[in-house]
Amino acid sequence: MFNYIWPIGLVVLSNVLYQICAKSVPTTMAPLASLTVTYAVSTVVCAVLYFILRENGSLFQEYGKLNWAVLLFGVVIVGLEVGWIYAYKAGWPVSTATIVQSAFLAAALIVVGRMLYKEPLSWSKIVGILFCLVGLLFINRK
């Protein structure tokens, strides 16, 4: 059970810290400049963790396994980071921006799951999407 729960706990904790960091990037600093430092730190942390968590591993052997998804993932992550930083610079509140994004993401991933991975689309998922959309109306009311 622990192996099932701990990754979600890590994602939640990391997401909370992520949003705090994204909102705390100096408003006078260019987002892409800040991300060059962010990714340099990430590269070092990933390399250190790779060698700590993997016995007799070779990064160069692992790099030989690269495919399009790994490369595109790098581009996508930049989009996420820049999008959040600009959203906060535009004035989105941290308490609302993530909920709005998550509702739209949930709806989009239900469609992606169905189209790309042939996941079943049940009435409960459709109703869930509708609840998400109705929730957005309430969250964005002033």
Image (cartoon, rainbow, N blue to C red):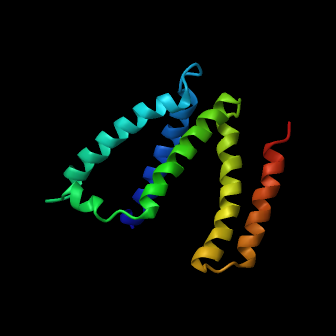
Whole-percent x and y of residue 128? 73, 66
Q: 135 or 50, which is in the foreground?
A: 50
**How many numbered badges does the structure rendering display?**
0
Residue situated furthest top in the rendering: 28
Q: Position of residue 21 (x, y in %)?
A: 51, 32
Q: Is residue 107 left or right of residue 38?
A: right
- Compared to residue 97, the image places residue 5 above or below, namely below
User: What residue is drawn where x is 48% and y is 29%?
Assistant: 34
Q: Is the N terminus in the top left, top right, bottom left or bottom right quadrant?
A: bottom left
Quarter holding the C terminus is top right
Residue at 61% over, 80% down? 118
Horizontal side of residue 93 vs 40, given as left or right: right
Q: In x, y percent, where is residue 22? A: 54, 34
Query: Left or right: where does residue 38 sit relative to residue 139?
Result: left
- Residue at (55, 30) in percent of width and height: 31
> Can you name the residue that lies furthest to the left here?
56
